[in-house]
Image (tube, grey):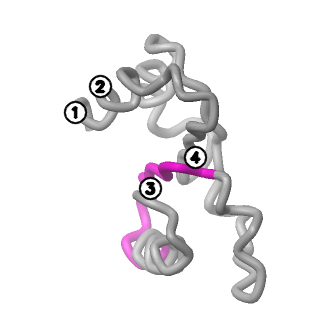
Amino acid sequence: MQAVLNQLHKRKGRSSYEIGVYIPGEGRRKWLFEALDKRGLDYDKIDDREINFDLTNPEAWLHYNVILERCLSFGRGLYATQILNSWGCRR
């Protein structure tokens, strides 16, 4: 994870670079948000309990260049990344 954050930090000058963090609730993975904040990277917190994927309309997700998936549920994370990868979102 440290290597990913370092690469994102190097590219932060790109105005079109957007990061989504797909997480299991607000309180978890606090260290990840602290690391992103420390590097001055903009990101969106995406709570996996509130997401409904519209399989016919991926446009809401295509503005992200990278999505960091940190789900506690293996199944939920697996299916989310399969959907996002099929739409061209990197994880």
Image mark count: 4
Going by the image, does 54 lie left or right of 88? right
Is 70 above or below relative to 53? Answer: above
Residue that badge 2 annotates? 6
Going by the image, does 44 lie left or right of 34? right
Residues in magenta?
A: 64-76
Residue at left 45%, top 58%? 71
Q: Secondary structure at mark 3?
A: strand
Q: Please name the amino acid that badge 3 sits on.
A: Glu
| Image coords of residue 75 (percent x, y) | 42, 78
Say whether disc 3 or disc 1 marks the residue closer to the N-terminus.
1
Residue that badge 3 annotates? 69
Residue that badge 1 annotates? 3
Q: Please name the amino acid that badge 1 sits on.
A: Ala
Q: Please name the amino acid that badge 2 sits on.
A: Asn
Say whether disc 4 or disc 2 marks the residue closer to the N-terminus.
2
Residue farthest left in this picture: 3
Do tag 3 and tag 4 residues touch (Cβ < 8 Å)?
Answer: no
